[in-house]
Image (cartoon, grey):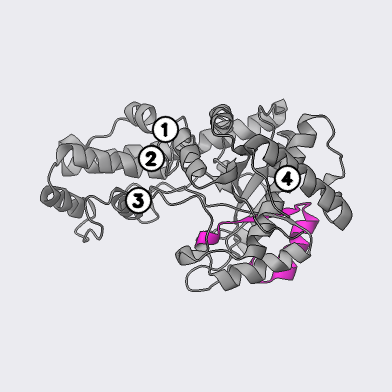
């Protein structure tokens, strides 16, 4: 379906309810408005808590809201065989998103127990890392003690993650050491003599270095994740569907100078896996990918009929534009933008039909039938236009 004017859309950002580049949800929508984003998707880890504020801001800025979530799971056989999936460092670890969830998800008792346990295990592991970091820092200088409750209250919305700890460390250092020279000296001591590569005013860079030196495997505050925090794929899919959404596989694609994981290296094999798991949607963060690799991969799966959407993630300290580009800021071509936009239209149709009690149980079968797929795209397009008052020229 050709468009002469394809709206900008972004179906994957994190908010402060997990960890985000943005200090608050409105900052994300203000930026989206400035960049003429027509639809924006929240995609926090292990929580729906940001949905009410996300919806409030979507109404204020007239940007269509897409309700998503992200989990980390485990494929045991792949872990045993050393096969990396969409995590380049941890064999067997699989990220899975849920798309088009209910605005107010209501899980069954069984699924809610799994969901809460996953969230709690994640928080417990991060709390232990925070404690170890504080013990280590106090040994270097007493003023660097970190208080768990203060960090939770000041920096989080309930979910404690590695990046919150890195920010807490950086802020504590800067609070007690006020000039560039003393900050660099204490950071070098914290890094066990390693040089600091970021300038002191580059907060994002400093926090990334703190995370790398203290909190990652081999760091003094590293705590291995509890295996119980990673649910099998079948449970993650059940939670997502119980919450009103459909599962979506986040693609890593090329990384580390064009390398691919063992799982993603064979496209046909990946497609067959997704079909066998009743997963009919994939998402990509194009900013991580070279344009040619992105284009080739996306066209393959688009021809297969999957729902494909793009995002920017914004799950790091660095604030970058919400408009989607490939690696190094390379602009997407018209075809890629159209595929992403139509994928968002399909999700908007899912949300709209579900909210109005008209969602067919065979929705995920209809997307493979060209005429039916086009009807659903038109439905979603109309929903987004009505919400954002934008018109698309065909």
Question: Of label 3 and label 2, which has the lower sequence position?
Answer: 2
Q: In this view, does 112 lie above or below 254?
A: above
Residue at (76, 30) in percent of width and height: 355
Given residues 76 and 147, the one toward you in this image is: 147
Where is the C terminus found, in terms of image quarters? bottom right
Marks 3 and 4 sit apart, C-alpha to C-alpha, by 41 Å
Which dot marks residue 156? 1
Where is the N terminus found, in terms of image quarters? bottom right
- Circle 2 SS class: helix
In the image, the segment drawn in magenta is: 262-287
Which dot marks residue 211? 3
Residue at (47, 70) in percent of width and height: 256
Q: Tell me if I can see residue 8 in this picture.
A: yes
- Labels 1, 3: front one: 1
Marks 4 and 1 sit apart, C-alpha to C-alpha, by 35 Å
Q: Mark 4 points at which residue?
A: 381
């Amino acid at each position: 379906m050709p468009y002469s004017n394809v709206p900008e859309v972004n179906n994957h950002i994190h908010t402060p309810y997990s960890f985000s580049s943005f200090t608050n949800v409105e900052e994300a929508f203000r930026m989206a408005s400035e960049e003429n984003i027509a639809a924006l998707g929240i995609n926090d880890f292990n929580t729906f808590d940001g949905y009410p504020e996300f919806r409030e801001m979507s109404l204020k800025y007239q940007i269509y809201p897409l309700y998503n979530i992200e989990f980390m799971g485990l494929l045991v056989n792949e872990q045993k065989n050393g096969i990396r999936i969409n995590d380049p460092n941890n064999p067997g670890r699989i990220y899975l998103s849920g798309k088009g969830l209910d605005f107010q998800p209501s899980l069954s008792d069984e699924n809610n127990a799994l969901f809460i346990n996953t969230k709690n295990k994640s928080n417990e592991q991060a709390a232990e890392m925070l404690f170890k970091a504080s013990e280590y820092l106090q040994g270097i200088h007493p003023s660097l003690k970190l208080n768990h409750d203060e960090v939770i209250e000041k920096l989080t919305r309930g979910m404690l993650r590695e990046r919150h700890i890195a920010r807490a460390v950086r802020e504590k250092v800067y609070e007690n050491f006020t000039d560039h020279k003393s900050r660099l000296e204490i950071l070098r001591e914290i890094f066990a003599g390693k040089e600091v590569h970021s300038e002191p005013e580059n907060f994002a860079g400093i926090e990334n270095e703190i995370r790398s030196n203290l909190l990652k495997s081999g760091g003094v505050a590293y705590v291995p994740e509890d295996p119980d925090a990673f649910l099998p794929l079948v449970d993650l899919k059940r939670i997502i569907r119980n919450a009103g959404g459909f599962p979506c596989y986040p693609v890593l694609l090329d990384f580390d100078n064009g390398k691919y994981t063992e799982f993603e290296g064979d496209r046909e094999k990946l497609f067959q896996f997704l079909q066998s798991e009743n997963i009919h949607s994939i998402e990509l963060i194009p900013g991580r990918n070279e344009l040619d690799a992105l284009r080739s991969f996306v066209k393959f799966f688009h021809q297969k009929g999957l729902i494909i959407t793009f995002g920017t993630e914004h799950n790091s300290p660095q604030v970058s534009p919400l408009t989607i580009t490939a690696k190094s800021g390379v602009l997407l071509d018209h075809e890629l933008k159209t595929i992403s936009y139509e994928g968002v239209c399909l999700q908007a149709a899912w949300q709209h039909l579900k909210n109005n009690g008209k969602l067919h149980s065979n929705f995920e079968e209809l997307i493979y039938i060209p005429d039916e797929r086009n009807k659903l795209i038109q439905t979603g397009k109309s929903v987004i236009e009505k919400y954002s008052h934008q018109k698309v020229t065909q």
